[in-house]
Image (cartoon, rainbow, N blue to C red):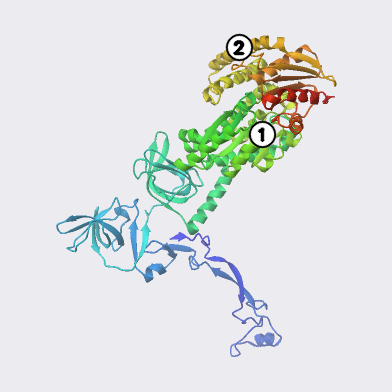
Amino acid sequence: MMKCETCGGTGYMGTEQRECPECKGRGKMTLSLGEASESDLMELLAGGKCERCGGTGRVEVRVPCPACAGSGELGKCKLCGRTVPAGRETCEQCATHPTVLRMDSACDVSDLKEGMLLLGVISGHFPSGKFVSLNNRVRGIVRTKARYELNEQVVVRVRSIRGNDVELEPVNMERYTLLELEKDIDTTPIEHITEGMVRIEGEVVSVRQTAGPTLFTVRDDTGTIKCAAFDGAGVRAYPSISAGSLVRVVGEAERRGDVLQIEVLSMRALIGGEADALKKRLSEALRKLSTPRRVELLVESEPMKKLYDDMQRVARKLLECVYTSTPIIIRHHADADGITAAVCLEQALLPLIRRVGGDEDAHYLLRRSPSRAPFYEMMDVVKDLDGALLARERFGQNLPLVILVDNGSGQEDVDALKLLSIYGIPTIVVDHHHPSPLIDELVDIHINPALAGGDYSITTGMLCLEIARMIHEGADRMVHLAAVSALGDRASGQEAQHYIELATARYPLEHLSDMALSLDYLSYWLRFSEGTQLVCDVLDLSARPQRHARLVELLSTQAKRAIEEQLAVCLPHVKTTHLPNGILLAVLDVEHHAHTFTFPPPGKTVGEVHDHICRTHGDEPVVTIGYGPDFAVIRSRGVEMNFPEIVSELAQRLEGAGISGGGHLVVGSIKFVQGMRKQVLEALAERLGRIQMEG
């Protein structure tokens, strides 16, 4: 016997009010005059209340559970195995029509009982009878002279079982109920699985077809395991079962290297009450597993405190992806801030993914991809989307979660985000560029310090470090990545200074700056590759400090030499003038007066020229413009400027210029058509001449 799951073993499904059987709803006591005492008669004459209902005429009674008929326990039908109330031998269906069982592929001789009616297939002949296959593991004999064709289905009764020898007899039956005979073993929680025959119940979170078996990843409320089913090389096993299906799996648990895997003998989808109960358990387990760590922020920051709950939401969403085998794409700007931000998340997630699904899942379920532009370009989103749709079609993977770090907040990101929304791909943005009000409508979570009273001086690397700490306790070893992001982005706020102070307890300030420069230099040559090992070596995450030190020294030295050579070429061609508002405007034609197709690229070249101008002009407000045939890069100091707003104004003002762009409030870039370069630059200089200085 087993406890009834419907009523929890109580035997009833709550209570209800019914008419009192004692007083028939009148509320007055009733007596048999022949048996009534004198005191009873006196009480009756005085209008006494019914003792059973207290005078209400209604009593509260328990409603029997329909599944167990009030017993609180369930048995099994001896013919078909269906659950029945305790004390009953057969279910109603078997009592009406005989039940014939079809053995699933996990069953063996031990699951047979004499008298069972089974559906088999004629699989061979011998002089005095036929061989009948009951599944691919069990075969019996029928001693008969009747004519049967090979592969003909036949109903048989088990006559005798002697070891592995099974004797059957044919049964002529026109009407019967066909049910599946499953392997009669207990369900084992995944976390308790050892080698041997097991049965699990869970949700299929991913399906991947290999050149050999089909790999199903199944999770229950205790863990996740791979289940390999083979119907032929490269043939999709159980095609009706896909990601999201609730299943019961029976098979042999074996070790593949250091990872347990179930070799599937049978798999079937759960429906009805079984599925509902399992779904409820899984939902509660996922909620607990995906609860992020509550950590104290490493620095005091009012904007970051306001963003804390949203950071927790991001951490929860990423953890849900880990425990449901949902792919994660981390898209980031290919500079020091974007790289450190993305690596913080990557390094926090990888240990969990490996623990849940092994190294293979770490390869398929997490991808970090750099973007050359500081926004989500259509080229990038089309590549991500095409890969995701192809993986779903070929391998049954879930569509991914896309998280954009150090890009995603601006007007230029809108078209790409709209494309993702058409396919229902969940999207998260963690950025510190000036935000567009349209972004919140297109993404699931949008974290930006500008939305909490902060500004771009709180870098994405700082935000992602704190999110990583909420995901995995090992993220505390990456505190220096926030400092590298701050130095790489020239952040000067109090938060940046605090993170740098924390990092200098382990690394000298100059070395942290060299790490940031090495990342910028390395990312230029990596182009569109993530360079995982190289990046980890630069950031001292590979546990090889000597190699880290030598690599950073080499890359930063080469980068500094390249910058010096570029400045030697550019500075003689920089033109300066004072605008009407007192701003020193420095202008450089990077198309004709800078090395191209080498490090530093135009954006960094303009930044280095701007830094040189600032060093040589004291505290004077400075705006530097580096322009090419169809673009301009702007850097500034000491001015109150909203550059995205300026771009929008120029776009409306100059018809046919094709103006677009964005960035932070005081730095950014602008694009236009080549034929309108002169007009755009003149209008930009005129607009800069009308802005105010800080203070």
Mark 1 Cα-neighbour bin, 10 Å: few <14, some 14–19, many ≥20: many
Residue receiving disc 2: 557
Q: Quadrant of the N terminus?
A: bottom left
Q: Is residue 194 visible?
A: no
Residue shown at 56% from the left, 36% from the top: 382
Give the mark nearest the N terminus, 2 or 1: 1
Q: CA distance from mark 2 to mark 1?
A: 35 Å
- Residue 460 percent across, percent down from the top left: 66, 30
Judged from the image, the secondary structure of the residue bearing numbered disc 2 is helix
User: Identity of the amino acid at label 1?
Assistant: Glu
Looking at the image, residue 545 lies above or below residue 290: above
Q: Is residue 462 left or right of residue 361?
A: right
Q: Which mark is residue 460?
A: none
Q: Secondary structure at mark 1?
A: helix
Q: Are marks 2 and 1 in contact (CB under 8 Å)?
A: no
**Residue 376, percent from left and from top:** 62, 33
Quadrant for the C terminus in the image: top right
- Is residue 94 among what the camera can see? yes
Judge by depth and name the residue closer to the eye, 431 or 31: 431
Is 635 left or right of 107, judged from the image as shown? Answer: right
Q: Is 50 drawn above or below residue 127 in the view shown?
A: below
Front in this rendered view, residue 253 or 532: 532
Q: Quadrant of residue 496?
A: top right
Say whether residue 334 is left or right of residue 667: left
Q: Residues within 10 Å of mark 2 (few under 14, many from 20)?
A: some
State the image quarter where residue 607 is shown.
top right
Q: Give the label on residue 412, or none.
A: 1
Residue 280 spot, x, y in % from top left: 54, 53
- Which amino acid lies under the numbered mark 2 shown in the image of this protein? Thr
Q: Outermost residue, bottom direction?
A: 34
Q: Horizontal and vertical percent for residue 488?
A: 66, 21
